[in-house]
Every structure is written in structure tokens, then in C-alpha cells.
Amino acid sequence: METFIAELEQAGLGQILYNEPLAKHTTWKIGGPADVLVIPHGKDQLVSAIRLLHKHGVPWTNLGRGSNMLVSDKGIRGVVIKTRDGLDYVRFEGTLVHAGASFSFVKLSRMSGREGLTGLEFAGGIPGTVGGAVYMNAGAHGSDVSRIFRSAEIVLETGELVRFDREAMQFSYRHSILHELKGVVVEATFELAEGDRNEISATLSAYQERRLRTQPLQLACAGSVFRNPPGDFAARLIQEAGLKGVRFGGAEVSELHANFIVNRGQATAEDVLTLMTHIQGTIADRYGVQLVPEVLVVGER
């Protein structure tokens, strides 16, 4: 690790922070320290950093914006990579949209609408980045990333740059091949269609109004906690079971949206995990349904 850090500093591969509290870098505002947090600037620094990690056999975790992730209270050993600067761009080419991994997925939907391109309206209420959306096959309102995905440039854990098309990504519900094949999205290309700007704007406004009305966006949270079971909604089951408002420590089932767990202040990862386990047990006992987490749980336990 010391040799790696020395080479990393010498190479000047972005901002390097030591024992950095990851609560500062997640939307839940929860998480212990990373041994080393690296924030590379742009594609070249990202690729070089991952190649250096591979060379020295240092374990690493990709954080992104930290909007769909629960980091343990003990934090993450090894290196955490946060993509940000230099990968926050968008480029339109006819009906194709090329976006850097750290570009806001919500902002991308709005910009595409202003260009008169339809297909990304579902993303208007999904927090996080383009890279995270591709990784999770993010979706809402009956659509998801796989419906509009054309290809993505990805840096694998060896540092090799590859381009995957839709088939290679092996998309399924809230899943892609990147869950098994470690890598970081650098850029994604989406194929949209020409549409009516006014209709697109109206749809986006309706989705935004619904989101503001039904989701606890004023509190620290991480989006939907559980995947929807086949033919049903996790939020409906949790609400029907009377679990809204149930609290462990600083973690609470949202009164607005039952599939959100909010940080009421000083919540720990263990608070959230205890609450998640309680929800899963209650739903399994009452309905015979096993709720599967949508959020990624990472770090030392």
C-alpha cells in the first residue's frame, strides 16, 4: 500500500484524501472512513489510477455519488474511487446522447427534453449519476436504462478500456454485468427518439411534482431501499404492514414513502441495517415475500 500511495502521489492522479469520512460523500450521510479516497480528474487519470491499483493488487471500491449506497460504520479498507471532475459532460449527436459517468442523470433527462428528445423522461426523478444509473439499470415509471442504452465505455479492474453494447451489459431488473465484472463506467451513449418538447416538458414536470409530493427529499436518504417484488411494490407491502414511522436509532421508515429510510440525525449504518432486517422479517412473516435490497451495502463489518 505504501508503494502504491507513493506512486499515486508522484503521478498526480487527482485529489487524494486519507482516512476520509465517507458520510461526507454519500446521500444518506452515513459511513466510516476510507483508508484512501482518490478523486481522479477525467478519463486518463481514472484509467491510470485503476491500472496502478491493479499493478499493486490494492483492493478498491467505486463510490460514484454515493446515492444508492450504505457504507458501514467501520468504513472501507483499501482505496475508494470517486468519479467527478472531468466526467461531468454531455454531447448530443442527432438522437444519440453521450454523457460522462459523473453527469447528473436528472439533469441529463431535462437537457434531452430541451433538445426535443424523448425516452429519458423516467430519469427525471432518479438521483445519482449516469455511471450509477447504468451500473444499477436504474428505472422508474415503467422504463429503465436498458430501454434506451446503446453502449458504454468501461474501464475494467485491469485498467483495460472496453466498450459494451446492450447485450454485453446483460441488463435485468436493477442489475447489470458490472455487478459481477468489476469495472467503472467512463461514458454512456443513449439512443433516444425525436419528440414534442412541450409533451416531454409536461411529463417531466408531472414526474417532478409527484416526486416532491411523495418522497422525503428534504431528509438524507438513498432512494428506494428494496427492489419491487414481482407483480407488487415494496412500498405498498411496507405501508400495509404498518411500518411507516418505525425507527431504530436515527434511521426511520419515511412517513411519505414507505420504501425510503431516512436519516433523522446521527443515524449509523447499523441503525439502517437493523431497520432493513426488521422490515424484511415483518414482510416475510406477514406476506411470505422476501424483500431484496436495492441499495448496495459496502465496507468492513
Image: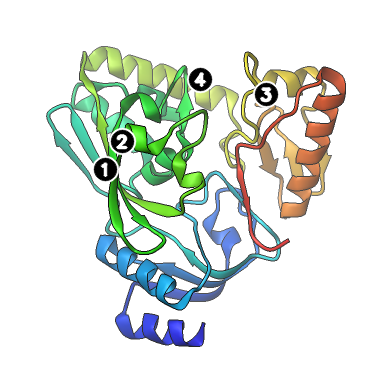
Q: Is residue 246 visible?
A: no
Q: CA distance from mark 4 to mark 3?
A: 18 Å
Question: Quadrant of residue 224 in the image?
Answer: top right
Marks 1 and 2 close (CB-CB < 8 Å): yes
Q: Which residue is mark 3?
A: 234
Would residue 47 appear left or right of 76 to someone viewing this image?
left
Q: Earlier in the sequence, mark 2 or mark 3?
A: 2
For residue 261, the mark is none
Q: Considering the numbered disc 1 on the image, is that residue within a helix, a strand or a loop?
A: strand
Q: CA distance from mark 4 to mark 1?
A: 26 Å
For residue 210, the mark is 4
Would residue 281 appear left or right of 142 to someone viewing this image?
right
For residue 99, the mark is 1
Marks 2 and 3 close (CB-CB < 8 Å): no
* Relative to 37, residue 263 above or below: above
Q: Earlier in the sequence, mark 4 or mark 3?
A: 4
Q: Amino acid at mark 2?
A: Leu
Q: CA distance from mark 1 to mark 2?
A: 8 Å
The mark lying in front, picked from 2 and 3, is 3
Residue 271, horizontal then vertical, whole percent: 78, 49
The mark lying in front, picked from 1 and 2, is 1
Q: Earlier in the sequence, mark 2 or mark 4?
A: 2
Depth check: 199 or 139 in front?
139
Q: Residues within 10 Å of mark 1 (few under 14, many from 20)?
A: many
Residue 190, horizontal then vertical, whole percent: 27, 32
Q: Which residue is mark 2?
A: 108
Q: Amino acid at mark 4?
A: Arg
